[in-house]
Image: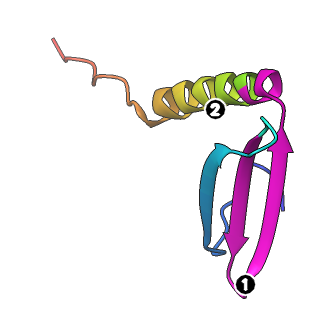
Amino acid sequence: MGIDKQSDIAANIEIGPTDLGMVRIYIEAEGGIGLPLDFDPEEADEIAEELRTAAAAARAMGEKPAPKKKR
């Protein structure tokens, strides 16, 4: 599956700090599969920026141009 393909797989995501000063993104998918991903704070900032950029691009894709007026 590519990043731009739709999926029917459901998952939950939790994000928070660890006791070791890392940022954890924890993903739990159907079937009880858990995936903890730990990042140092700088990496987490980079991920946050990538999320903001992707959100802006997705938002722009969802906007439709105004219809042209006929004269």
Please check the rendered image and state whether residue 27 is part of the magenta-colored stretch, yes or no: yes
Coordinates of residue 43 in the picture (x, y in percent): 82, 27
- 34 left or right of 64? right
Q: Name, please, the residue furthest toward the front.
A: 19
Nearer to me, 34 or 8: 34
Characterize the local packing of mark 1: few (<14), some (14-19) or many (20 or more) Cα atoms within 10 angstroms.
few
Which secondary structure class fits the magenta region best? strand
Characterize the local packing of mark 2: few (<14), some (14-19) or many (20 or more) Cα atoms within 10 angstroms.
few
Q: Looking at the rendering, in which quadrant would you find the C terminus? A: top left
In the picture, residue 57 is in which quadrant? top right
Residues at marks 1 and 2, CA–CA distance in whole angstroms: 25 Å
The relative height of residue 21 versus residue 4 in the rendered view (above or below) is above
Question: What kind of element bears circle 2?
Answer: helix
Q: Looking at the rendering, in which quadrant would you find the N terminus? A: bottom right
The relative height of residue 3 versus residue 43 in the rendered view (above or below) is below
Nearer to me, 4 or 54: 54
Image point (83%, 37%), residue name = 39
Please check the rendered image and state whether residue 65 is part of the magenta-colored stretch, yes or no: no
Q: Which residue is mark 2?
A: 51
**Magenta-drawn segment:** 23-44
Image point (78%, 49%), residue name = 3
Of labels 1 and 2, earlier in sequence is 1
Nearer to me, 21 or 1: 21
Residue 43 in sight from this viewpoint: yes
Coordinates of residue 33 in the picture (x, y in percent): 78, 79
